Image: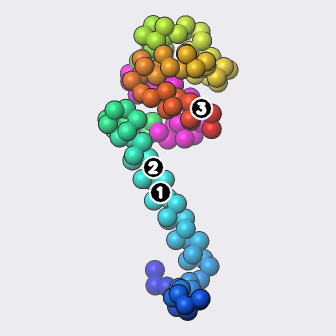
Amino acid sequence: MKSALQTVTIAGRPCAIVPLAEYHALREALEDAADDATLIRLRTENAGGEAMPAAFFDRILDGESPVRVWREFRGLKARELAEASGVSAAYLSDIETDRKPGSARALQRLAEALQVNMNELIAQSAG
């Protein structure tokens, strides 16, 4: 895209003037790039450096329960996660369906069983 860039000096500093539509397009591209960088960082940091496919993160970003998404990413059935974490299957179901937020203790146990930081189960579900 060829810009109709103009320069001016304001308070002794050179400044650029671009059409408003181009400014908005640049801002949007910058925000998208920042979002992409965040997703890449999360995909590699959340699970001890292993990459989680973007499709799983998209599910979390779309509002699905992070506990369910991480469980499915780990290839666990709900009953398997319940047994591994010591959280009852009924309580896990309530957490995954947002009927209950999950206590700090339950989320910590689930995080340990899923091998993720507890914040990964809290941050997205609280947002």
Residue 15 in the image: x percent, y percent? Answer: 53, 86
Write down the residue under mark 1. 34
Q: Is any part of residue 79 visible from this angle? A: no
Residue 125's label in the rendered image is 3
Residue 36 in the image: x percent, y percent? Answer: 44, 53
Query: Residue 64's image quarter?
Result: top right
Q: State the CA–CA distance, disc 3 to disc 2.
A: 18 Å
The residue lying toward the viewer, choosing from 92 and 7, is 7
User: What's the residue type where badge 3 is placed?
Assistant: Ser
Total marks in image: 3
The mark nearer the N terminus, 3 or 2, is 2
Q: Is residue 115 magenta?
A: no
The secondary element bearing badge 1 is classed as helix
Q: Residues within 10 Å of mark 2 (few under 14, many from 20)?
A: few
The residue under the point 59% across, 71% down is 24
Write down the residue under mark 2. 38
